Amino acid sequence: MNGRDDRRVSRWKPWLLLAPTLLALTIFLLISLAKMLGYSLFDPGFTSKHFARIVQEPVWLQVLWITLRTSLLVTLVTLMLGYPVAWVLCKLPA
């Protein structure tokens, strides 16, 4: 192989390493989410009653708010802990 072919192969190497993970995510996550969305929209015919319940019943809005608040808190704590750790690891000698 010449230098040009080596660059071409090295450009695709990260994507080839990611391929099994991306395939698993597609199969287990995206297909499951699509099926769940399908079940919520077609019961047995097309309906939006499940989504209307979110705004009609106060308990679902409360659950949604608690979920969003928790996810924001977890994200902030992760950032506050992750960036200093990444900085220290970056400054360590090889």
Image: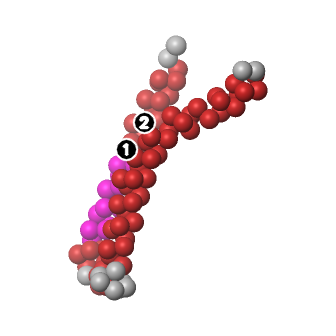
| Residue 76 seen | no
- Asked whether, in this view, residue 7 is left or right of residue 64, the answer is right
Q: Please state which amino acid type lies under the numbered disc 1.
A: Val
Looking at the picture, does residue 72 appear above or below residue 22? below
Q: Is residue 81 inside the magenta stretch? A: no
Q: How many marks?
A: 2
- Asked whether, in this view, residue 31 is left or right of residue 6, the answer is left
Per the image, label 2 sits on a secondary structure element best described as helix
Q: Is residue 64 inside the magenta stretch? A: yes
- Quarter of image, res 11: top right
Looking at the picture, does residue 65 appear above or below residue 93? below
At x 52%, y 20%, the residue is 91
Residue wearing tag 2? 82
Residue wearing tag 1? 77
Q: Are marks 2 and 1 in contact (CB under 8 Å)?
A: no
**Numbered range of the magenta stretch:** 62-77
Q: Position of residue 88 (x, y in %)?
A: 47, 24
